[in-house]
Image (spheres, rainbow, N blue to C red):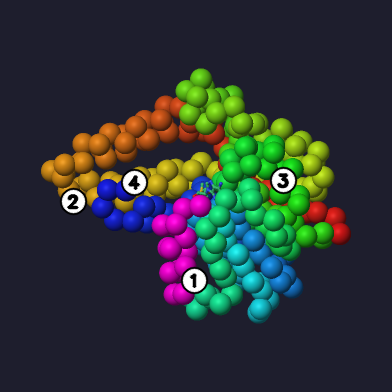
Amino acid sequence: MTAGGERYSALRWNAPLSEAHAEWLIEQLEVGSVNSVLDLGCGWGELLLRVVEAARDGCAGVGVDTDEALLARARRSSRGRGMERQVSFVGAPAEEWGRPAERVLCVGASHAWGGTAPALVALTRLVAPGGRMLFGDGCWENEPTPEAGAIFGADVMPLDQVVDRALKAGWRVLSLTTADQREWDEFESSWRRDGEDWLLNHPQAPDAGAVRQELDRRLAEYVTSYRGVLGFCYLVLGRGG
Ligand SMILES: C[S@@+](CC[C@H](N)C(=O)[O-])C[C@H]1O[C@@H](n2cnc3c(N)ncnc32)[C@H](O)[C@@H]1O
C-alpha cells in the first residue's frame, strides 16, 4: 500500500511470523560463535538485525534486496540500534550474490531463483560448510483452490515436497515449523493496516477509491481463496562441514 505513510509500516517483518516463533528460529540457528550472516531478500532487515544481535560481538551481517525504499528503512533501523558498522544493506539481485556466509536467511524470497526448488539448490553455494540456513517459503497447507493456484502460481509445493527437495539438494532438515492461523491472520491484517489507517483519515482523497479497491481485493482473496490453504514453512537447514 503506497498511498500516504510508509509501506508495510504495521508489519514487524514481511512474513507470517510471531515474535515467539522468530525467537525460537533464531535459537535453532545457533549463532553464538558465528562471524557472518547473510540475508537474501532482506526487506527492511528486522530479522537480520535480530540474528546479528544474538551472535557474538564482531559478527558481520549483510542484507541484500532490490527494493531501495525498504533498504533505506533497514539502514535507518540499523543506525537506530547503533549497528550500522556491523550490518550493511546492499541493493542487488539476490540471485547474483556470490559470497557465502556461516548463517543465511532467505524468507519469502525464493522467487528470486525461480521458486522453492531452484532456490534450495542455488542456496547450497551460499552457506559455508558447517553452516545453517533459515529458509522460509510459501507452501500448500491444503489442496489449493483454483483461485489460490492462479494467485500464487505453479511454483508453490505442498510441504512434503518442500522437504523432499531440501533433502535432495543435500540439506539436513534441523527443524521444520509452519506459520499458524493466528500468525497468518496477524500478517494479513498488518499488511493492510497502513492502507486502512490512511483510508479512514483520507476518505475524500482522489486515490481513496483505488486504495479501497486494492484493500478489499486483498481481504476478499484472503478469506475466500487462500486462508488455511496457503501455508508458510520455516526450515532450518544444515550443511555438513
Ligand atoms: C516477502 S518479502 C520478505 C522480506 C524479508 N525476508 C522479511 O521476511 O521481512 C520478499 C523480499 O524479496 C525482495 N526481492 C524480490 N526480488 C528480489 C531479488 N531478485 N533479489 C533480492 N531481493 C528481492 C523484495 O523486495 C522483498 O523485500
Q: What is the residue that sits farthest to the left in this orientation?
A: 204
Residue under the point 52% across and 31% down: 152
Residue 1, numbered circle? 4
Residue under the point 72% across and 70% down: 34
What residue is disc 2 on? 201
Which one is earlier in the sequence, the residue at label 1 or at label 2? Answer: 1
Cβ–Cβ under 8 Å for marks 4 and 1: no
Cβ–Cβ under 8 Å for marks 1 and 2: no
What residue is disc 1 on? 78
Distance between the Cα atoms at labels 4 and 2? 15 Å
From the viewer's perspective, is the residue at label 1 or at label 2 nearer?
1
Asked if one can make out residue 24 in the rendered structure from this viewpoint, the answer is no
Distance between the Cα atoms at labels 4 and 1? 24 Å
Vertical placement of residue 166 versus 125, above or below:
above
Asked if one can make out residue 58 in the rendered structure from this viewpoint, the answer is yes
From the viewer's perspective, is the residue at label 4 or at label 2 nearer?
4
Which one is earlier in the sequence, the residue at label 4 or at label 2? Answer: 4
Local SS, label 2:
helix
Specify the amino acid type for callout 1. Ser
Cβ–Cβ under 8 Å for marks 3 and 1: no
Q: Using a 10 Å C-alpha cutoff, classify the residue at mark 3 as few (fewer than 14 neighbours), some (14 to 19) or many (20 or more).
A: some
Residue under the point 61% across and 58% down: 39
Is 117 inside the magenta-drawn segment? no
Distance between the Cα atoms at labels 3 and 4? 31 Å
Q: Which residues are drawn in magenta?
A: 66-80
Does the magenta stretch mainly form a helix, a strand or a loop? helix
Vertical placement of residue 43 versus 87, above or below:
above
Tell me which corner region of the image, top left, top right, bottom left or bottom right, holds residue 207. top left
Tell me residue 93's x, y (percent): 57, 50
